[in-house]
Amino acid sequence: NAGVTQTPKFRVLKTGQSMTLLCAQDMNHEYMYWYRQDPGMGLRLIHYSVGEGTTAKGEVPDGYNVSRLKKQNFLLGLESAAPSQTSVYFCASSRLQGGGYTFGSGTRLTVV
Amino acid sequence: GEDVEQSLFLSVREGDSSVINCTYTDSSSTYLYWYKQEPGAGLQLLTYIFSNMDMKQDQRLTVLLNKKDKHLSLRIADTQTGDSAIYFCAETRGNEKLTFGTGTRLTIIP
């Protein structure tokens, strides 16, 4: 039982490049979330999904897009990477929106 | 809106008890969680408490909830080096997303 799997684990991008981060969960959870973690700022919600085919903005959505075409996958896209998007990105899923979240191990992204 | 506050750092001697504190502003919070993040890893759910409880104990972990003061604490008895991590509290009204605190980095002094 893998839980929540994030790929890739590390990535270095040049400013202006694009990339997609993949999150996959095998727990049949309805809810999925993308967070970024920066020193001293805790976790900030980027986008989330309340079910297959749905997405919604979190507190810091600018510069990111998401898609949830399949229930088990939640993709986070950066169309034109900026140095301010250097961060550690975490995906999480939950059965209930207010229930305990299961987190992936994170993707460390550096934009130079 | 909701806000969850934590101190950023805590240092404790090995073998002592650690107490990590959290305050929140939403009086409608129904579930409160503690997560642990070890270096280079994601967050793991440690424990949780319902708002109708004052205390919950699970082996070395004790969670205390003071609803009147909107104060949550996590006590780790007999702190070990493996307890070094960042600890996040989180709250929700049950049908909404979790709101996380900024996290408290616990350092163990040998």
Image (cartoon, coloured by chain):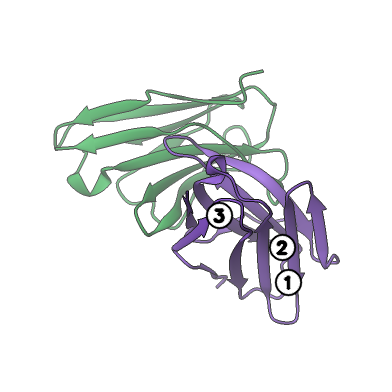
Q: State left or right for residue B80 relative to residue A38.
A: right
Task: Kindly check if marks 3 and 1 are in contact, taking CB atoms under 8 A apart as contact.
Answer: no
Residues marked 2 and 3 touching at CB (< 8 Å): no
Choose top left, top right, bottom left or bottom right for residue A89. Answer: top left
- Which residue is at a point 36% across and 40% down the rendered structure image? A88
Q: Amino acid at mark 3?
A: Phe
Residue B60, given in percent of the width and then of the height, sits at 73, 49
Crowd band around label 1 with a 10 angstrom C-alpha radius: few (<14), some (14–19), many (20+): few
Q: Chain of mark 1?
A: B
Sequence-wise first label, 2 or 1: 1
> Of the residues shown, which amino acid type is indicated by label 1?
Ser
Question: Considering the numbered disc 2 on the image, is that residue within a helix, a strand or a loop?
Answer: loop
Above or below, B71 relative to A91: below
Residue corresponding to mark 1: B28
CA separation in Å, label 2 and label 3: 17 Å
Q: Are marks 2 and 1 in contact (CB under 8 Å)?
A: yes
Residue type at mark 2 is Arg
Q: CA distance from mark 2 to mark 1?
A: 6 Å
Q: Is residue B94 visible?
A: no
Q: Are marks 2 and 3 on the same chain?
A: yes
Can residue A41 be seen here? The reply is yes
Classify A74 as above or below B51.
above
Query: Horizontal and vertical percent for residue A102?
Result: 62, 37
Which is more foreground, mark 3 or mark 1? 3
Q: How far is disc 3 from disc 1 in space, using C-alphas?
A: 19 Å
Q: In this structure image, what is the colour of chain A?
A: green
Q: Which mark is residue B93?
A: 2
Decide which of B102, B96 is in the foreground and name it.
B102
Residue drawn at point x = 31 percent, y = 43 percent: A87
Q: What number is the disc on residue B88?
A: 3
Of pointers 3 and 1, the one earlier in the residue sequence = 1
Secondary structure beneath dot 1 equals loop
